[in-house]
Amino acid sequence: MAVFADLDLRAGSDLKALRSLVENAAHLGYSVVAINHVVEFKEKKQEIEKPVAISELFTTLPVVQGKSRPIKVLTRLTIIVSDPSHCNVLRATSSRVRLYDIIAVFPKTEKLFHVACTHLDVDLVCITVTEKLPFYFKRPPINVAIDRGVGFELIYSPAIKDSTMRRYTISNALNLMQVCKGKNVILSSAAERPLEIRGPYDVANLGLLFGLSESDAKAAVSTNCRAVLLHGGAASKEPDIMENWATTIDPEKCSVNMKMLNFF
């Protein structure tokens, strides 16, 4: 059986809500999730918090639907960068940043997107989906990112909440696919509540609307997530994550003919 991952569950102050998120993800069949701590730099000497140990958040972890193992929960840091100086802060705090299993960056300008793709030591580059793209994607930096093993993340929960954001999500995703051709793309929920998570087969099918091929859409919730974990070193910290990570996905559950109305 395939191993599915959602590498963006939003960490909040409500521990009960976070546990419900993880429980729902396990019920939907996700074997791996990441709790995402999002930081927006506002000061030049802003500190990066150390990740909270998963053992402090969960005494026991729910068992994945259809499997005999509990879900694996990882830590993730996403840094929103809107100024070149933020890249220097990222480098200066790299020792603390690297305590997280996954490092992502959300660049807000074309120049910072170029820097993130070509130079920053990160695992994921986040693509905006809540507004019209402020710049056009260009092939050179994206090709460099692909060669470096850096992934591109698209989140889908905003599309569930608002029809305008749905249009932006699909439009921005299509623009990305025209350049990256579906390579290194992952799809995540960025869910804050359990109802914002969709099952992996539904998410893979959503990838078809985003311009992904059927095989790339399947990879976006499975093997491409595995590549992100390998790039970030999470596999060496948690070696059992990689066990049984197969590429087989039931084609009957992920098909071009599946109706997407149920997704939203």
Image (spheres, rainbow, N blue to C red):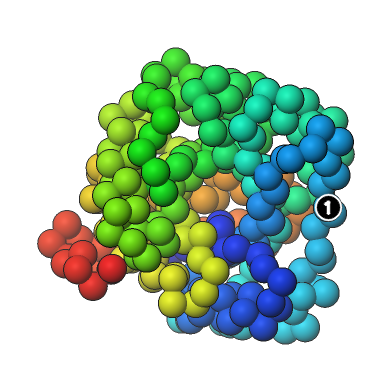
Q: Residue 181 at x, y = what percent?
A: 32, 32
| Residue at 77% in and 26% down | 88
| Residue at 60% in and 63% down | 10
Q: Amino acid at mark 1?
A: Glu
Q: Residue furthest left?
A: 257
Question: Residue 258: which quarter of the image?
Answer: bottom left
Residue 122 in view in this figure = yes
Q: Decide which of 136, 176 is in the foreground and name it.
A: 136
Q: What residue would you read off at disc 1? A: 49
What is the quadrant of the C terminus in the image? Answer: bottom left
What is the quadrant of the N terminus in the image? Answer: bottom left
| Left or right: residue 52 compared with residue 2 | right
| Left or right: residue 3 compared with residue 182 | right
Residue 243 in view in this figure = no
Label 1, secondary structure: give it: loop
Q: Residue furthest front?
A: 42
Q: Decide which of 92, 81 is in the foreground and name it.
A: 81
| Left or right: residue 63 compared with residue 203 | right
Q: Decide which of 132, 216 is in the foreground and name it.
A: 132
Q: Residue 14 at x, y = what percent?
A: 69, 77
Q: Decide which of 252, 198 is in the foreground and name it.
A: 198
Q: Residue 260 at x, y = what percent?
A: 21, 64
Where 30 falls versus 247 (above or below)?
below
The 10 Å Cα crowd at callout 1, few under 14, some 14 to 19, many 20 or more, is few
